[in-house]
Amino acid sequence: MPPLTLRRKLAILSDAAKYDASCASSGTEKRNSAGKGGIGSTEGSGICHSYAPDGRCISLLKILLTNFCVYDCIYCVNRSSSNVQRARFSVEEVVGLTLDFYKRNYIEGLFLSSGIIRSPDYTMEELVRVARSLREDHQFAGYIHLKVIPNAAPELLAEAGRWADRLSTNIEMPTDIALETLAPEKRPSEIRTAMARVRGKLDEAAPEAKTKTRTAKPKWAPAGQSTQMIIGADGANDGAILNRAAGLYSGYKLRRVYYSAFSPIPDASSRLPLRPPPLMREHRLYQADWLIRFYGFDVPEIVAGGEDGLLDLAIDPKLAWALKHRERFPVDVNRADRDMLLRVPGLGTRSVDRIIATRRHHSLRLDDVARIAGSIDKVRPFIEALDWTPGGLTDHQRLRAKLTPAPEQLALF
Amino acid sequence: MIAVRLQSLNDFDEWRGKARQLLAAGLSPENVAWRIPGEANGLFEGGDAMLPEAAGPIGSVPRQFIELAQTAINHADPARFDLLYRVLWRLQEVPQLLLNAADKDNSTLTLMASAVRRDSHKMKAFVRFKAITDDTGFERFAAWFEPEHYSLELTAPFFARRFDGMVWAIVTPYRSVYWDTQTLVFAEGGRRTDVPEVDAVEEDWRTYFSSIFNPARLKISAMKSEMPVKYWRNLPEAELIAPLVRGARQAEQQMIERAASQPPSRHVKQTEKYAQAAEAQSEITSLADARAAVQGCRRCPLYEHATQAVFGEGPEHAQVMFVGEQPGDQEDLAGQPFIGPAGKVLDAAVEKVGIDRSRVYVTNAVKHFKFEPRGKRRIHNKPDAGEIQACKFWLNLEIGFVKPKVIVALGATAAHSLLGRTATISKLRGAPITMEDGTVLFVTNHPSYLLRIPDPERKALEREKFEQDLVLVRDAIAALEACH
């Protein structure tokens, strides 16, 4: 069999990586190559350089080092029992591709993952070599995200964090039982232990807030750590998923939990649901996650907005919560505190901040709120303003129907 | 009416100079018309000659206005200069104007600035460099880009910071910029044909673009809103979008239909190896076995959210065993018992009364951390009777293998576990309890209890009582050693 061309390997190993939801290149330290002769910069917020027709942004070269794998995780296209075509990049090939793509402004950096070959240590060492070469041999200052291989030696993890902006270990499933059923060789406690180690290193590297003489500590994974959970491959409900996420956020200081709707994979096991991925459910989970992290909601509140532990698919979770708690509305935009304004459907954190800033100067009318919020339809039934009171609208029986978006015709192409 | 002629499309300093003159002369916005290069004056408008020479003092403006104006002036709307001058004029009367998000002029200006920032952001995203390689193999790069606003000047420094070691140019219809690894040089605009049509790596990029796309997740509107169609003609990957979308349904169907086939022989070998390894770890015959097995514990639901089971630590045949409640946040992360604040209190007390810490085995009644997630913290939660009972299995194994002579229950949970019933510390402390197997049990507070007492006087008192309990333990150990 002739050796695979680089392009063929790229096709195989990016195809194999497309089920990982993370593509973010944000939240890292600011650095650039100015005056250093290298290439690359990161300025806090990431840049999406392209979009695939699946609506997902392409900001990183997201590939596997290899899709050979000794594990047999049922949900994974690269599991050892699958008959997909296999390939393996050399360290130099990945480095070369990253630089070539970066110089043409196609990408923000590299997101490198891998199937597990030989041993966790061997695999992790290979990932680390790519990152080290980019940083040391090529003065690459762009973004690097490395996948942590659970059970790899702590020294390798420590080195990975020296080169990478972000590290991630995928929790994969919302419950340990599901993980052990679908990924028989994976140990949930090993995955969480890997996350705990990353958190420990992040804590060590964090600047001490109180000391005045700040000794510059070496940077370590400045964009923190993240994880991914696959949604819809097992029977867990949204409550279980969000509880798992809350536990992970609080335990390991994760920047993000990615929810990845399980999609059919080629050569799939018959034990999996072979139907289109539940994209709306994934979307609602992201919205709920957002409410937990930035709007002061807790998990039980959000889950109670739906039925039987599942979020309402027709409307967003904040609206769902508000419709079930109409006794707390209308909220007076000229008087209410920030926490309560944040609970008004249709008002985001920025709108709320601008409302608070503006009302110091004059009382707001409905028009003012409309201008600040961008759109008033969803907001109107839940607020009072100088010239507006919703009257019976808040408690109107058909309010939910009025605020439920009409089913959309899919865009034809 | 006075018409002010500007030399540049988006030079803030030029506009500011002229606006200051107008302001100093007291010319209200209704009496000023702004003209850009190439634009004729109106019939009844005076020319530049009418620009007043006045140079008196003018009021200051908030820094926020300068920042907003520097951005908004790059907007393509011809009305931008007029709006800027009107806001400047109104700021003299209402210095707080920019804080009023509901004001129409203010919100228009803000929207203009964000449209420019968005355009600049899209330039950062969608510029595609094409390499030109000379005979020596040296690469230079050039890109053609069509911004919606005049955002090249605003964005060029970003490219200089990012591609410092690279020689590059970006050509737009209204202006071009060149970087020679040292300085940014701006020049006249150009045409698409000024940059090469293709690049050697483009085909790899297209391969990546089509392979990373998951046909089962088609979301065309999301793609179009973030990557507006107007940019597509300069993106080498965009020509793939239509065929990928057209083929998506079929590609998805193929993924579904390609159900599991016969696993490769490599897999069969691996599975056998795994099965052998699993068989090897069978029953628990030593402390080390128990330590390994506890990681797979499913006896109660606590394993699900804790990081790992935290087993006891210490010499394998320690004479004394301290039993706490459950691992805390730090213990859970590190996988070791008593390394957090409560552990420090215990260590200090043990050392103070003269017990040799290195000869002590420490463990917990419950091996998994029970907590309530609250934002970025995990709040300790007391284990219930069922969890204590379930975990007794492991504590019994530890006691069985270590065979301590003296056991110290730290707190109610540990006492409950060891006695098999709910226990009150105050009633049980101060005297040894002889267990069925002859082990001597002492009961005292959990050290974390001492940490939680706010009143310093009571705290000192309780610490003393705790140490007194440990003195009893020390004496009991000494008595045992004397017997042997």
Image (cartoon, helix red, strand yellow):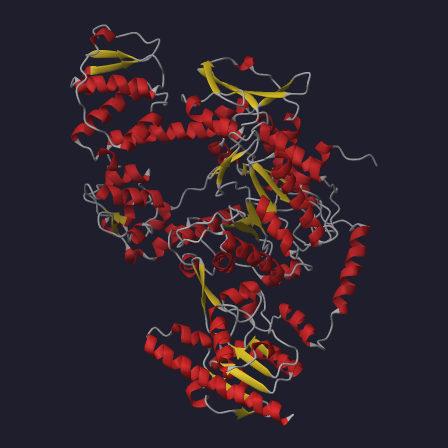
Quadrant that contains the C terminus of chain A: top right
Is A157 above or below relative to B420? above
Front-lying residue, B443 or B308: B443
Identify the residue shown where x is 55% and y is 80%: B322
Quadrant that contains the N terminus of chain A: top right
Identify the residue shown where x is 22% and y is 43%: A359
Horizontally, is B158 left or right of A17 in the view? left
Q: Can residue B307 be seen in this view?
A: no
Front-lying residue, A228 or B25: B25
Image quadrant in which you'd find residue B80: top left
Is A291 above or below relative to B438? above
Horizontally, is A253 left or right of B79 in the view? right
Identify the residue shown where x is 49% and y is 13%: B190
Q: How many marks?
A: 0
Horizontally, is A103 left or right of A255 in the view? right
Percent across and percent down for residue B482 are: 61, 92
In the picture as drawn, the residue positioned furthest to the right comes out as A1
Identify the residue shown where x is 30% and y is 28%: B66
Percent across and percent down for residue B210 are: 63, 33
Horizontally, is B150 left or right of B337 in the view? left
Front-lying residue, A200 or A118: A200
Q: Is residue B263 visible?
A: yes
Percent across and percent down for residue B89 are: 20, 25
Percent across and percent down for residue B32 are: 22, 15
